[in-house]
Structures are given as structure tokens and as C-alpha cells.
Image (cartoon, grey):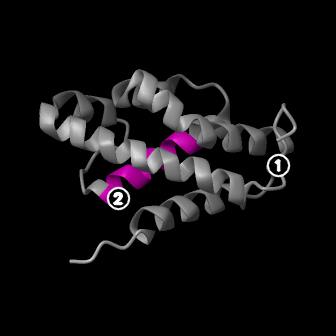
Amino acid sequence: MIFDPRTIATPVYNALSELRSQPNQDDTRLKEQKNQAIELYTYLSTWGMMRLKAEEKALSQEGKKQVVKKFFECLQELSLVNNLAGNNGLNHLKNLSTDDYLGLTGLGLSLAQEFSFWATAVYHDVKDSQGE
């Protein structure tokens, strides 16, 4: 089998494009989406997969919450591990074997890098608080 790098890039691009094109979004929500997508890698590498999943419920900013949900949807699609994107995702992560959890975390880190890259491309005209 030949690895196609679009395997990871395509679902991420589609997810962010879908979020970006939702109707009735203001600049604040678009900034939240862009910033969260860029920050996923740092959060995941610092705090881990279980905390990121828990953060999905705790986030009060809807734009950020949308990105985390899309992240877990993409992770579920790519990993073929069911029940990551749903409400029971945290329990599912908690019950994985160590090898499965660590493997999923590695895939999640690669996925988070893609989110960061594609956020810059998809939200190219959205300026964050630092003017970037």
C-alpha cells in the first residue's frame, strides 16, 4: 500500500472549510475557530488527548468548541476508532489500552499539525488579536 499524504490533509481541509462556510458567523466566531485550530497541537502535546476531549464540553466559546468537535470527528474517521467524536468519547479514551491510546495520541498530534496549517489557509483573511 502506498501512503497518500492527502489522507490526513483532506478531512482537515474539508472540516475547516465546512466550519468557515457556515451561515451567520461573525468575526469573533471566525477568530475563535482559527485560533483554536492553530492552538490544537500545543494543547494536545501539553495536556493530552483526554483533557482535550474534556475541554470540548468545558469550552464556552462556540467557535473553539466547533473546532475541537471537528478534530475528534477527523480523528475518528482516520483512526477507525469508533465513539471518539460522541458524548461518550472521554469514557472511550479512558478505556483504551495503553498502546491504543498512545498510538491515537500520535495520530492526533499529526492531525493537529494539519489543523494548524489549514487554519492559516482557510482563514487567511481572518485577523487574530495580534494582527496575524
Measuring 62% from the left and 41% from the top, which residue is drawn there? 38
The answer to whether residue 13 is left or right of residue 89 is right
Q: Distance between the residues labelled 1 and 2?
A: 28 Å
Measuring 33% from the left and 59% from the top, which residue is drawn there? 78
The magenta-colored residue range is 67-78
Q: Is residue 85 visible?
A: no
Q: Do the residues labelled 1 and 2 touch (CB within 8 Å)?
A: no
Mark 1 burial class by Cα count in 10 Å: few <14, some 14-19, many 20+: some
In primary-sequence order, the first of circles 1 and 2 is 2
Of 3 and 68, the residue lying toward us: 3
Q: What residue type is labelled 2?
A: Glu
Measuring 82% from the left and 41% from the top, which residue is drawn there? 132
| Residue matched to label 1 | 126
Q: Which amino acid does label 1 sit on?
A: Val
Numbered-mark total: 2
Of 14 and 2, the residue lying toward us: 2
Q: Point out which mark residue 77 bears.
A: 2
Residue 49 in magenta? no
The answer to whether residue 112 is left or right of residue 121 is left
What is the magenta segment's predominant secondary structure?
Answer: helix
Write down the quadrant of residue 1 in the picture.
bottom left
Give SS at disc 2.
helix
Measuring 70% from the left and 59% from the top, which residue is drawn there? 122
Question: Picture coordinates of residue 99 (x, y %)?
Answer: 14, 37
